[in-house]
Image (tube, rainbow, N blue to C red):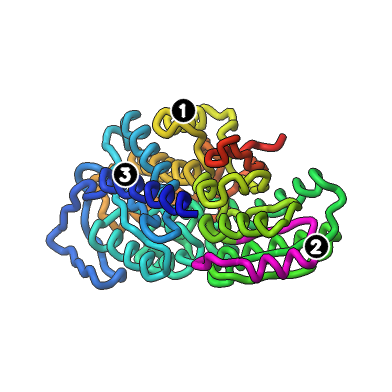
């Protein structure tokens, strides 16, 4: 366990260094004589224009246990920034990512959004990390009429927050059932199912509802539902209660740190059946938590490094060259979110030069371009419904395969 903590600490330190390299201002924002600015509220009139690099906000977790997810998104966004600027940016004008730490709670996300909107004057925001945070922070952007693209928000009701809220992360209702079907294919004799979920997180509550519904639709017996907190580290009581009921399948909706610890403790207590991890465990960072005991966990995916699209080949190669491993889902989704901004900005710039538009006008017109566009991303070809939900056709299921050393491993996609 001490080794897992040490590895996690080192990983977060690396993330902090990456974020330092990306922080700071983007292009300058020039106030016109009639402009009004108030950094204490989002209900301001921004009669400003942008000169220089075009600022896009990245509101992801850099600290707290949620940083295990947030750092992956940030890496994907950074790769996108470098790639698209090497291709000329927005018709010759570069983009500049401006990072704000959302930490792991609603207050952190709210503060990050307010800073990006009012101080950094970004044209749009990628984030926040958690759906729980999105329900609190996205309304701020909606009131300010600033586009938001969620790259890891999959809970029910996210796009419905407002006209300026979209997501490239497929809803849990579409993705989650795939892993249950894969488990049944792996073991058709599954009858009893135990479900665990983090009750203090909006996404996990939404995801577990889908999992439980799928279990019932598949004619399986739900023998117990065990609750926990994302901040918990000791799951002995819940795990023991579930194991005593002899489930054939365990399904966990949590985050990387708590979910990984739960997997580890289930195995240590003798559970030998199949384990499904929800989207919060969909990160290689979980491997440092449950280590060798992660082996065999099934997780549904909305991204595959093996997708044959040209942009995915470029993204995958850039990631592997830098990190010596395959990119994960959250990384690919963050890349796609930045890509959507870039391509929508390019289309808008050809219609009306961005440098001539007031910030308010730019944000409004950019939002229209985002929702009406089609994009060939590492996730495959995507678009958006009128309310901002992603339209995506490619989905997968992966099994965690740990290496012999018990410390490293990878996601192996099930054909």
Q: Is residue 185 left or right of residue 179?
A: right
Q: Could you say where residue 386 lies in the image, as x and y percent from the top left? A: 55, 55
Q: Which residues are magenta?
A: 230-253
Seen from the viewer's position, the closer of residues 84 and 222 is: 222
Could you tell me which residue is drawn at 43 percent across and 40 percent down? 339
Residue 18: which disc?
A: 3
In the rendered image, which residue does mark 1 sit on? Answer: 317
**Image-based side of 131 in relation to 392, left or right:** left
The reply to whether dot 3 and dot 2 touch (C-beta < 8 Å) is no
Across and down, in percent, residue 42 comes to: 31, 69
- The residue that disc 2 covers is 246
* SS of the residue under disc 3: helix
Kindly report which numbered mark, 3 or 2, lies closer to the viewer in this rendering: 2
- State the SS at label 2: loop
Q: Relative to 247, is 341 above or below?
A: above
Tell me if residue 338 can be seen: yes
Quadrant of the image containing the C terminus? top right
Residue count near mark 2 (Cα–Cα under 10 Å), binned few <14, some 14–19, many ≥20 = some
Is disc 1 surrounded by few (<14), some (14 to 19) or many (20+) residues within 10 Å? some
Q: Upstream in the sequence, badge 1 or badge 2?
A: 2
Q: CA distance from mark 1 to mark 2?
A: 44 Å
Q: Is residue 20 left or right of residue 170?
A: left
The relative height of residue 187 versus residue 377 in the rendered view (above or below) is below
Residue 163 forms part of the magenta stretch: no
Q: Position of residue 151 (x, y in %)?
A: 48, 51
Q: Number of callouts in the render?
A: 3
**Cα–Cα gap, marks 3 and 1:** 19 Å
Of badges 1 and 2, the one in the foreground is: 2
Secondary element at tag 1: helix
Q: Which residue is rendered at x = 65% and y = 56% of the image?
A: 268
């Amino acid at each position: 366990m001490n080794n897992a903590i040490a590895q996690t600490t080192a990983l977060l330190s690396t993330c902090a260094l990456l974020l330092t390299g990306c922080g700071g201002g983007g292009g300058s924002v020039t106030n016109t004589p009639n402009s009004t600015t108030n950094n204490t509220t989002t209900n301001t009139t921004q009669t400003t224009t942008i000169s220089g690099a075009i600022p896009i906000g990245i509101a992801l977790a850099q600290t707290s246990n949620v940083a295990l997810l947030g750092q992956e998104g940030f890496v994907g966004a950074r790769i996108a920034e470098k790639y698209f600027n090497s291709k000329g940016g927005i018709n010759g004008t570069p983009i500049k990512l401006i990072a704000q730490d959302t930490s792991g709670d609603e207050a952190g996300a709210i503060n990050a959004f307010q800073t990006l909107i009012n101080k950094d004057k970004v044209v749009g925001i990628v984030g926040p990390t958690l759906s729980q945070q999105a329900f609190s922070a996205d309304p701020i952007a909606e009131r300010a009429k600033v586009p938001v693209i969620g790259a890891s928000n999959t809970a029910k009701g996210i796009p419905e927050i407002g006209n300026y809220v979209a997501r490239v992360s497929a809803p849990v209702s579409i993705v989650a059932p795939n892993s249950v079907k894969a488990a049944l294919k792996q073991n058709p004799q599954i009858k009893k199912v135990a479900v665990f979920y983090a009750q203090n997180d909006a996404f996990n509550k939404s995801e577990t509802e889908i999992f439980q519904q799928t279990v019932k639709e598949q004619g399986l017996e739900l023998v117990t539902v065990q609750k926990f907190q994302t901040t918990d580290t000791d799951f002995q009581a819940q795990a023991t209660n579930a194991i005593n009921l002899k489930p054939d399948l365990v399904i966990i909706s949590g985050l990387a740190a708590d979910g990984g610890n739960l997997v580890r403790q289930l195995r240590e207590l003798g559970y030998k059946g199949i384990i499904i991890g929800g989207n919060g465990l969909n990160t290689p960072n979980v491997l440092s938590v449950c280590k060798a005991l992660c082996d065999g966990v099934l997780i549904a995916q909305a991204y595959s490094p093996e997708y044959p699209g040209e942009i995915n080949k470029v993204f995958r190669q850039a990631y592997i060259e830098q990190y010596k491993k395959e990119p994960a889902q959250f990384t690919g989704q963050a890349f796609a979110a930045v890509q959507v901004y870039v391509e929508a900005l390019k289309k808008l710039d050809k219609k009306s030069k961005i440098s001539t538009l007031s910030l308010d006008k730019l944000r409004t017109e950019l939002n229209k371009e985002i929702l009406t566009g089609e994009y060939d991303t590492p996730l495959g070809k995507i678009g958006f419904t009128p309310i901002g939900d992603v339209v995506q056709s490619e989905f997968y299921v992966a099994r965690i395969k740990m290496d012999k050393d018990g410390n490293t491993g990878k996601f192996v996609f099930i054909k």
